[in-house]
Image (spheres, rainbow, N blue to C red):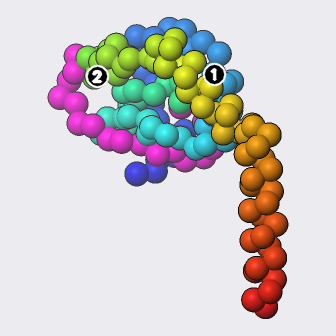
Amino acid sequence: MQVRVDEIKVKHRIRRDLGDITQLAESIKAHGLMNPIVINEKRELIAGERRLESVKLLGWQTVDVRVVYTKDEAEKIQLEIDENLYRRPLTAGELSSGLSRVDRLRNPGFLLRIWLAVKRFFSSLFSKSKR
């Protein structure tokens, strides 16, 4: 569901320091919003304040949201706590392995580059001969 960014109300948040959101904004700009912002039925922010501020920084007018129904203020706060407390960051080894894989995919070795060039050459030859 899409909601206008300016309709989302940010009230009484537990998190006080959003930190630097420029990298998150750049990621959203490059790849889109991977996880929707969570609001309640009153359009009050439950989870995703850093994402919300990032899309504001990017000048978005609307944003994807997920609506959850909260029975009271205590449940709203508990959802915010759960959203931030139970996620698990990548370990140093997982991060290192992932970054190495990205590097290898973006910068193939010399032999792989030659093989890909040969493939492209023959592919272009045969695609032209069919015309």
Query: Cβ–Cβ below 8 Å for labels 1 and 2?
Result: no
Rendering coords of residue 129 (x, y %): 80, 86
Q: For residue 41, which quarter of the picture?
A: top left
Residue 34 located within the stretch drawn in magenta: no
Q: Amino acid at mark 1?
A: Ile
The tally of labels here is 2
Tell me the residue that label 2 is attached to. Answer: 79
Chain-order first, disc 1 or disc 2: 1
The structure residue drawn at horizontal position 56% and vertical position 14%, both measured from the top left corner, is: 18
Mark identifier at residue 131? none
Tell me: residue 124, above or below residue 32.
below
Can the viewer see residue 60? Answer: yes
The structure residue drawn at horizontal position 60% and vertical position 31%, both measured from the top left corner, is: 101
Give, as a single range, the part of the protein colored magenta.
Answer: 52-75
The structure residue drawn at horizontal position 79% and vertical position 91%, both measured from the top left corner, is: 131
Alpha carbon separation for disc pair 1 and 2: 22 Å
- Tag 2, which secondary structure? helix
Tell me the residue that label 1 is attached to. Answer: 21
Rendering coords of residue 53 (x, y %): 58, 28
Number of residues whose C-alpha sits closer than 10 Å to that of mark 2, classed few (under 14), some (14–19) or many (20 or more) = some
The structure residue drawn at horizontal position 68% and vertical position 31%, both measured from the top left corner, is: 103
Q: Amino acid at mark 2?
A: Leu
